[in-house]
Image (cartoon, helix red, strand yellow):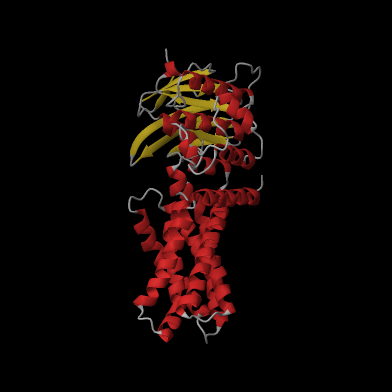
Amino acid sequence: MSTARIAFSIARRDVSLELSGREASITVLPFVAALMMLAGLGLGGQGPVLSAAAPGLVWLVVLVSAIPLARGVAAAERADGCWDLLRALASPTALLAGKLAALWLWLLIAWAVASMLAVALLGAAWRPEAAVAGVLGTFGVAVTTVVLGVLLPHGARRPGLIAVLLVPGAVPVLIAGTHLAAPATSGLPWALLLASYDAISLITAYAVFPALLEE
Amino acid sequence: MNPAPQTASSRDSVAPAAATLSLRAVTRSFAGRLVIGPIDLDLEPGAVCLVEGANGAGKTTLLRLAAHLLAPSSGRCRNAGLAVYVRPGAGARGEQSVGQALDWAYRTAARRGMPPDDALDLVGLTVPTASVVAALSAGQHTRLAMAIALVTGPALACVDEPTAHLDGPGCAGVVQAVAALAAAGSAVLVATPVPDTLDCPADAYLRLRHGLLEVPP
């Protein structure tokens, strides 16, 4: 079986697991909704302030959502005794690609829900560039999360460590994603920044992933 | 100086085959403490090697080294083809159904192993395939782990304490599964702390003591 087919098989399995257990949906989507609604109250409820803050808030929510989702990369697999089988059946590249595809999908959903709530509740303006930011930005966050999710499966303070490492590591996504979605900004430089971040993250992940899998 | 490598060949073999597993002067340390080795071991296709050893003797470390899940601290570890490490209660996510877990492993291993229904019959797991893995008993989960090993059709199966949680028929199912793996050409490395619980015909019996392999008297 080719690397691509095994990666697809892993991603499809993760989607199927989510449909069965709804762990990510139950964990992340209510959190996204609550945060977007509470932010409106926390920021004072004034329309101009809310609409100006909304793009950054969306990306903050996406970054924080990645922290619980990181558990599905390796920690949940280890807890159920499946990590060894995954490592046996899949090459490091296939495992990286499969886990990345599934995590990218969850982050895209989290981003889409947060963006819709930002428009509906906070009065944010919708720009087509925001969709570009959503696709590129969530991909970069997904790559970083997969690497950290594999890196920290044994840590007793795993969620805290992932938060400490992921949020600063994904600052370029936060900044570029926010600017791409904000009105009256030139989109191209920020889109290039996101694309560069994605490329560097992916190349780094591809290079270090086999070593991260070694015990 | 390392002792001569322990070699396990299938009882039916008439000519030396290329080793499925080859360990040469393999050691593994944890936090600077040597846990196992140096180990020299060859396993040929279809050979069954039973390794006994007390708790903490290094059996799991040996099996995980053989399955390439653990990198050796020194020495060389080679295996030809897919190597799976099997332990009771592993191999399937709690949210999956028995059928999903087996089908996924079977398909991802390119359907080279035993079909899932046949594997379930062989290990004597009689629950409906729609049963959720999390709802299985410990013994049923152990049988499922063996069935997953069967459907992957590995070149090397490293089976760690497979009779844990099992009743008499369950132990018999493990013996049948090991025999089926060997008959299909898999080299099988089985570790157990209590050999009496596993009446498993083997081509080689080894004992692991203080991290070193020896032939028991």
Q: Residue at x 38, y 81 (%)?
A: A45
Q: Along the line of sight, which residue is nearer the eye, B20 or A116?
A: A116
Q: Quadrant of the C terminus of chain B?
A: top left
Quick check: can you spot residue B34? yes
Q: From the viewer's perspective, tell me whether residue B181 is left or right of residue B160.
A: right
In the rendered image, the vertical position of residue A109 relative to residue B89, given as above or below: below
Q: Residue at x 37, y 56 (%)?
A: A159
Q: Along the line of sight, which residue is nearer the eye, A213 or A52?
A: A52
**In x, y percent, where is residue B41?**
50, 27
Q: Along the line of sight, which residue is nearer the eye, B67 or A159?
A: A159
Quick check: can you spot residue B19? no
Q: Residue at x 42, y 40 (%)?
A: B73
**In x, y percent, where is residue A149?**
44, 54
**In x, y percent, where is residue B170?**
49, 22
Q: Quadrant of the N terminus of chain B?
A: top left
Q: Along the line of sight, which residue is nearer the eye, B172 or A1?
A: B172
Q: From the viewer's perspective, tell me whether residue A161 is left or right of residue A184.
A: left
